[in-house]
Amino acid sequence: MDQLQDTIQIPLIAGYNDNNEPVVEQVNVVSLPVAGRQPVTDPEALLSKAGLEQPGEFRLTKSPAFIRGLAADDRIRYPVDNAATYELLEHSGNLSVRVFSKHNTEELDQALTPELELIDGRIDISSPGLLVYTIHVSIGFQQIEDVLNRTLTRFPDTIWYYGNVYDPEDGVTPLNWWQDIAQSV
């Protein structure tokens, strides 16, 4: 089957608003085979009681816009009984880079995307005010940051963040999941 035909969307909790209501992001995933079960093609089936007893395993096809700690090609189990509704099973080695702007991002996209493609980055989400990129950690933090900082100097009111480098709870503690990957490269 074509990967595009296999892609489904599942709702993951990105956080909570001021009224403590969940903020949900629809994330593109591909269902992975789990022993004794067919791959999931209907995400609604996962929300049934039976689905909660046997969650599916999925690979993200794109880095999410707002869910911290995940990037494209990470492997997760969903749904699970925790606040996030998913469990991270394996980091792919990809970094998620989120670029926010107070202005329309069309011109920024045209300037930044080719620069990141030169270092094997790819754009996953392009919308007014937000661009999301995926870049493998083996490229190196310094090279990625140099490209971002050099390009963004021409775009006021624009800022970038890693989406899966820092602890989602405090936003400053490095997760260090890339240490094993960096040693093997």
Image: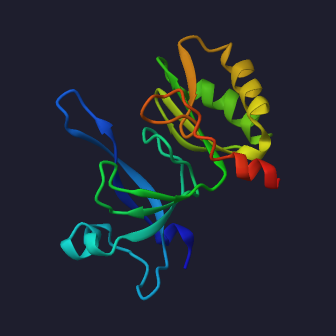
Q: Position of residue 135 (x, y in %)?
A: 68, 44
Q: Position of residue 22 (x, y in %)?
A: 24, 41
Task: Judge by depth and name the residue closer to the eye, 171 or 94.
Answer: 171
Q: Which of 143 and 1 is in front in this view?
A: 143
The residue positioned farthest toward the bottom in the image shown? 36
Q: Position of residue 165 (x, y in %)?
A: 58, 37
162 in relation to 85, above or below: above
* Visual colour scheme: rainbow
Q: In which quarter of the image is residue 115?
A: top right
Q: Is residue 13 left or right of residue 87?
A: left
Image vertical order of residue 36 relative to residue 181, above or below: below
- Residue at x-position 49% and y-position 79%: 33
In the rendered image, residue 8, in percent from the top left (x then y), is placed at: 41, 64
Left or right placement of residue 73 versus residue 50 in this view: right
Which residue is rendered at x = 55% and y = 30% of the image?
A: 173
Residue that appears at 62% across and 15% down? 155
